[in-house]
Image: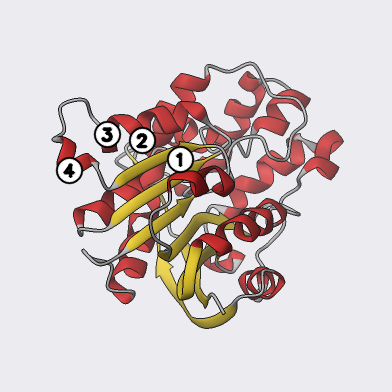
Amino acid sequence: MTPTLVRQPLPHAGIAPRVDLCARARDWSEIQERMLVPLYEAVYERLEVGSGTRLLGLGCGSGLALLMAASRGAQITGVEGHSPERLALARERLLPETADARARSGTRLVEGAPRDVTGARTAPYGLVTAFEPIGCLAGDSEGLAELLAEAIPLAERGAAVVLAGWGPPERCATSSVLRVAARLADPLRSAGSWRPALRDDLEEVAHRAGLKPDGSGRVSCPFGYPGTGAAVRGLLSTGLFDAAIVATDQAQVEKELTEALHPHQRPDGTVWMPNVFRYLIARVP
């Protein structure tokens, strides 16, 4: 699921459904992205992110996590290689045309991969974040390992690298909703099926990347929506239901997603799903 909530759209599906990618990016930015704000806050507080921090955000999406770091005084660079539509929204947030040139000088947003940052780099990064949580799709850590391999040479020795993942399924109410995507996409399950998060997912990624784990934490990140319609739009914006849409059609996916959300709907019509996310802090040797 991302990020920020999930891996970026369509890393696991070979055929994209016909959707309005700009509208989907806007739904992500306006509805879904904020669900992980408690995670961002917990990490930034623990690592004392501030004016002395040079941060590289991998899979920065529409930039909310970067905006929060910038508000603490950090110099930020964001890299987004899967959704130019989300990156365009990040530019609106972080590089508005009305912004003072001096305020914008420490901010960079790059479409592509970490290697595309190298040319204009002036100093190594002290913090690298990969806030797109792993642990809800089979193989969803593979792309993360590749990103880290490119990003680590840009970081200083001892720099913190933050990885994020889903908590245990029994602590994540949204897990039951994600199973709908896997069931509907049964013919495409080999391209990315739901699986529960494993305890050592993040540590395994860190070890493969040559990083040394240096602490972890768990953060409550409930998914709350004003109604079922907003919940459906927000969850579809993650891209996790795209394989199901290809296998069936969008109307069918929306219908079954609405049904799966019913147990989480409150008497006032709002939708509330408690979740726990985990983060790992690792160090560059």
Q: Amino acid at mark 3?
A: Leu
Crowding around mark 3 (Cα neighbors within 10 Å: few <14, some 14 to 19, many 20+) is: some
How far, Cα to Cα, is label 1 from label 4? 21 Å
Secondary structure of the residue carrying numbered label 3: loop
Give the mark toward the camera: 3 or 2: 3
Q: Position of residue 268 (x, y in %)?
A: 29, 41
Q: Position of residue 102 (x, y in %)?
A: 16, 42
Q: Which mark is residue 61?
A: 1
Crowding around mark 4 (Cα neighbors within 10 Å: few <14, some 14 to 19, many 20+) is: few
Residues at discs 2 and 4 in contact (Cβ within 8 Å): no
Q: Which residue is mark 3?
A: 95
Question: Residue 4 or 146: which is nearer the viewer?
Answer: 146
How far, Cα to Cα, is label 2 from label 4? 16 Å
Name the N-terminal-most of marks 3 and 2.
2
Q: Which residue is mark 4?
A: 103
Q: Amino acid at mark 4?
A: Ala
How far, Cα to Cα, is label 3 from label 2? 8 Å
Q: Which residue is mark 2?
A: 90
Give the mark toward the camera: 1 or 4: 4
How far, Cα to Cα, is label 4 from label 3? 9 Å
Q: Is residue 249 above or below residue 109?
A: above
Question: Residue 89 or 121: which is nearer the viewer?
Answer: 121
Give the mark toward the camera: 3 or 1: 3
Q: Residue at x 67, y 21 (%)?
A: 17
Q: Is residue 20 above or below residue 213?
A: above
Name the N-terminal-most of marks 1 and 4.
1
Q: What count of labels does the image hold?
A: 4
How far, Cα to Cα, is label 2 from label 1? 7 Å
Residues at discs 2 and 1 in contact (Cβ within 8 Å): yes
Secondary structure of the residue carrying numbered label 1: loop
Give the mark toward the camera: 2 or 4: 4
Q: Quadrant of the C terminus?
A: bottom right
